[in-house]
Amino acid sequence: MAVVGVGIDVVDVARFMAKLEATPALRKRLFAPAERDLPPNSLAGRFAAKEALAKALGAPVGLHWVDAVVVKNGDGQPSWELTGSVAARVEQLAVASLHLSISHDAGIASAIVVAESEERR
């Protein structure tokens, strides 16, 4: 496997929630319906994850946030459901796997994403 990209992001939970409350349309632009009503830490963590994913994919113009949905497996480990613009970028870069870690502490949510391909670069 070869690393295609790495992204990291940090979000102040209170500041992020204030922005969501001040701009109600932002919630629909950033989150898929299944994500929109999650608690503040989860929303901030998912936003950090989406930002980190965009960075790992080279931050191209045209990615739609709702095309990347954070889901959890049976053990609570986060992963992705990708569609549309994000899935197309993953295919374009020949990404074979995406690793995601999200953390919350002291009012901060953080996420890191590592994108790997099967081919050596």
Image (cartoon, grey):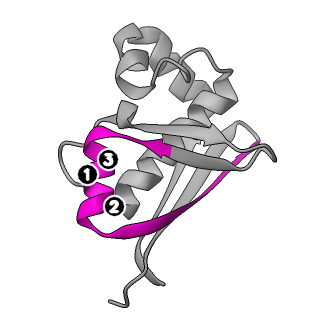
* CA distance for labels 3 and 2: 9 Å
Q: Which mark is residue 86?
A: 3
User: Circle 1 — which element?
Assistant: helix
Q: Quadrant of the C terminus?
A: bottom left
The relative height of residue 28 versus residue 66 in the rendered view (above or below) is above
Tell me what residue is drawn at x 38 percent, y 30 percent. 66
**Residue type, mark 3 in image:** Val
Comes first in the chain, label 3 or label 2: 2
Where is residue 108 shown, x and y percent of the image? Answer: 66, 41
- Residue 40 appears left or right of 86: right
Q: Which mark is residue 88?
A: 1
Give neighbour class at mark 2: few <14, some 14-19, many 20+ (Cα, 10 Å): many
**Residue type, mark 1 in image:** Ala
Dots 1, 3 in contact, CB < 8 A: yes
- Res. 67 image quadrant: top left
Give neighbour class at mark 1: few <14, some 14-19, many 20+ (Cα, 10 Å): some
Q: Is residue 20 rendered magenta in the image? A: no
User: Circle 2 — which element?
Assistant: loop
Name the residue carrying label 2.
Answer: 57
Where is residue 26 shown, x and y percent of the image? Answer: 37, 18
- Residue 59 appears left or right of 62: right
Magenta span:
81-105
* CA distance for labels 1 and 3: 5 Å
Tell me what residue is drawn at x 45 percent, y 24 percent. 32
Tell me what residue is drawn at x 28 percent, y 39 percent. 84
Dots 3, 2 in contact, CB < 8 A: yes
The nearer-to-camera label among 1 and 2 is 1
